[in-house]
Amino acid sequence: MQRPPRASGRRAGLPRVQEFFATYQNVVETACPWLVRYVVAAAALTGKNTRDAARLAAQERYRVTDPVASVLENLLVSVDLDAAADALKDVEAVAKADYFLAPHADALVAALRKQVFQVLANVYTQLPVARAQALLHVGDEFDWQSVAADVKGGVTVEKGVIVFAQAGPARRGVLEKMDKLSHRSDNTMAMLFKKQ
């Protein structure tokens, strides 16, 4: 029996780690809640199951408080941008001090910044660059396009203001099409009855 080819690079095992944590979630919750940090880190680095990881962090907050878990919890559960920004400030130091997260510290901070920026794009239509810099803890030299690549609709920076082009929910488009169709059918029915 041949082994499947292994992915190379430092983050090759993250999907397997996530799968492990998903399989043994009850064990993590009851016996070793300190592993929540790694569940959240794996979710942030892969971009998958972030809501589940945030819910787990919220459930275990009374036992273990951790800045890595607090960022996603504050973003996706309580939607508190200021608290998420405060936790994001501590993530880099915690990640560099942690033996298992140290090799991924820069990537983890970048992934969490992208998560914060995605929530900002969903909440705001315009945001001053200074406010965004304060929330993301970045300087003037920060490249906004690096975090804006995943935002639906696009992002532009004009005169010190970040403008988020809203991509509107799919439901809104469906409702608008239904409304147009309803008007057309009403007009057609009115024309048919007018001819008779």
Image (cartoon, rainbow, N blue to C red):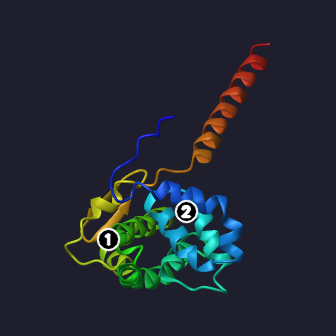
**How crowded is the residue under tag 1: few (<14 C-alpha within 10 Å), some, or many (20+)?**
some
Describe residue 156's horizontal placement relative to residue 84 as left or right.
left
Q: Residue at x 41, y 50 (%)?
A: 153
Describe the element under mark 1 as helix, strand or loop: helix
Q: CA distance from mark 2 to mark 1?
A: 18 Å
In this figure, what is the number of numbered marks? 2
Q: In this view of the protein, which residue sits in the foreground, 148 or 28? A: 28
The image shows residue 77 at horizontal and vertical percentages of: 62, 72
In percent of width and height, residue 38 lies at 51, 71
Q: Residue at x 67, y 33 (%)?
A: 183
The numbered mark, 2 or 1, whose residue comes first in the sequence reads: 2
The tag on residue 50 is 2
Three-letter amino acid code of the residue under disc 2: Thr
Q: Amino acid at mark 1?
A: Asp
Please identify the quarter of the rendering in which residue 133 is found. Answer: bottom left
Q: Nearer the viewer, mark 2 or mark 1?
A: 1
Q: Position of residue 173 (x, y in %)?
A: 58, 42
Q: Residue at x 46, y 58 (%)?
A: 14
Please give the residue where the numbered disc 1 appears in the rendered image: 106
Which image quadrant: the C terminus?
Answer: top right
Along the line of sight, which residue is nearer the eye, 115 or 3? 3
Q: Is residue 134 left or right of residue 15?
A: left
